[in-house]
Image (spheres, grey):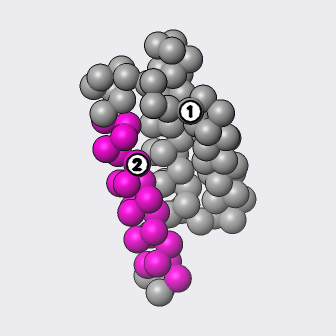
Amino acid sequence: MNLTDLIGTLAAILTTISFLPQALHTFRTKDVRGISLGMYSAFTLGVAMWLVYGLLLGAWPVVIANVITLALASTILVMKLRYR
């Protein structure tokens, strides 16, 4: 693994892990009052676009991180729409 891949992999791990506490809290409590629908909609779309970008480049750290984050963000977005 070269330095570029190492940096990309570490960045992907850190940004995905940083998202987990909010996701777990939301799953446990189903409390979505503090979540902005507009922000989460834009965030989820942005993550989907990063996923496509990673696929087009063949950048697997970007792809894997965004698959995980997209699954979590989409679930929270659905919860926001359902429990608001």
Among the 4 quarters of the image, the one containing residue 58: bottom right
- View extreme (front): residue: 34
* Residue 5 image position (x, y, % from top left): 49, 77
* Badge 2 or badge 1: first in the primary sequence: 2
What residue range appears in magenta? 4-24
Please name the predominant secondary structure of the magenta segment in the image: helix
> In the image, which disc is placed on residue 19?
2
Residue hosting label 1 = 36
Horizontal side of residue 76 vs 24, given as left or right: right
User: The residue under label 1 is which amino acid type?
Assistant: Ser
Q: Is residue 58 above or below residue 26?
A: below
Q: Is residue 74 above or below residue 47?
A: above
Where residue 16 appears, x then y in whole percent? 42, 54
Instruction: Please give the name of the residue rendered at 45% of the width and 24% of the height, measured from the top-left corner.
Output: 33
Q: Is residue 5 magenta?
A: yes
Tell me the amino acid under the disc marked 2: Phe
Please provide percent x and percent y for residue 64: 49, 54
Label 2 with label 1: CB-CB less than 8 Å: no
Give the structural element (helix, strand or loop) at label 1.
Answer: loop
Q: Compared with residue 15, is residue 84 higher up or lower down, i.e. above or below?
A: above
Task: Tell me if mark 2 has few (under 14), some (14-19) or many (20+) residues whose alpha carbon lies within 10 angstroms of its own.
Answer: some
* Residue 14 picture quarter: bottom left
The answer to whether residue 49 is left or right of residue 80 is: right
Q: Could one spot residue 74 in this view of the protein?
A: no
Q: Nearer the viewer, mark 2 or mark 1?
A: 1
Q: CA distance from mark 2 to mark 1?
A: 15 Å
Is residue 35 left or right of 20 when viewed as pictured? right
